[in-house]
Amino acid sequence: MFRPRYNPTDLPVVMQQDPLELPSFQAQNYQHVASQQSSGTVRISGEQIQLGTAEAPVVWYVEGDLVLEDASITGYGVILVGDDLFVEQGSAIESASDTHATIAIYAQDDVRIRGHFDAHAFAQDQLSVDNEVRVVGGLAPLGQVSLRADASITYAPLAQELLQALRRGQ
C-alpha cells in the first residue's frame, strides 16, 4: 500500500490507471551526439570520473556494460550505455547540484544500483535498487522494478542542460 506523506484531501491511494506507453530507447541512435565514446564493456575501479559543467555537459556513449566498483562519477552529463549499468557497493554517482540531478543514464538493458545514486536512470529492461540505497533523482524502467528493503527514492528534477546536450545533434 502506498502511503503518501502529504494527502490533504484524502484522495484514494490505490487506483487503476490506463497503461502508459513509453517510447523504446536505442542508445546507439544517440551515439553521434556523444563527445566521448568507449567500445566494449567499461569497468571503472577506484577512480573518480568528472563529467562536464552546466555550460558544457558531456555526452558519453559506452558500447557495452558500464561497471562502477569503488568509483565515483560527478559533474554534468548524459551516459548512454549500450547494455547494462552496474553501480556496485562503495561506488557513487553524485549530482553537482543540490536542487537538480545533473547526471542522466540511459541503459539499453538492465540497471542495478548497489551504491550511492544521485541521478536519473532509464532502463530498457529491469531495474533493481539494493538495501539501504538512497536514490536522489528519478528511475524509469520499462521492465520489472525491484526495490529491496530500506531502499528509498527522493525525486529531484533533471537539469535542463542535459536535455540540451542530447539535442545538439538533431
Image (tube, rainbow, N blue to C red):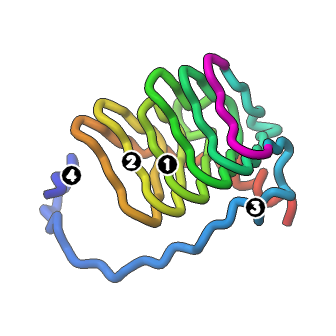
> The disc labelled 3 sits on which kind of residue?
Gln
Query: In this picture, which residue range is highlighted in magenta?
Result: 39-47
Q: Position of residue 98 (x, y in %)?
A: 53, 30
Q: Residue at x 69, y 37 (%)?
A: 42
Question: How many numbered circles are shown?
Answer: 4
Sequence order check, earlier mark of 4 and 1? 4
Residue that label 3 marks: 28
Number of the label disc, if any, that sits on residue 4: 4
Residue 94 appears in the rendering: no
Q: Position of residue 91 (x, y in %)?
A: 52, 25
Question: Closer to us: mark 4 or mark 2?
Answer: 2
Marks 1 and 2 in Cβ contact (< 8 Å): yes
Check the image and report above or below for 68 versus 157: above
Identity of the residue furthest to the bottom in this view: 18
Q: Residue at x 37, y 61 (%)?
A: 144
Of the 4 image quadrants, the one containing the C terminus is: bottom right
Rate crowding at label 2 as few (under 14), some (14 to 19) or many (20 or more) other CA atoms within 10 Å: many
* Element marked by disc 1: strand
Check the image and report above or below for 123 versus 15: above
Rate crowding at label 4 as few (under 14), some (14 to 19) or many (20 or more) other CA atoms within 10 Å: few
> The disc labelled 2 sits on which kind of residue?
Ser
Q: Quadrant of residue 58?
A: top right
Number of the label disc, if any, that sits on residue 111: 1
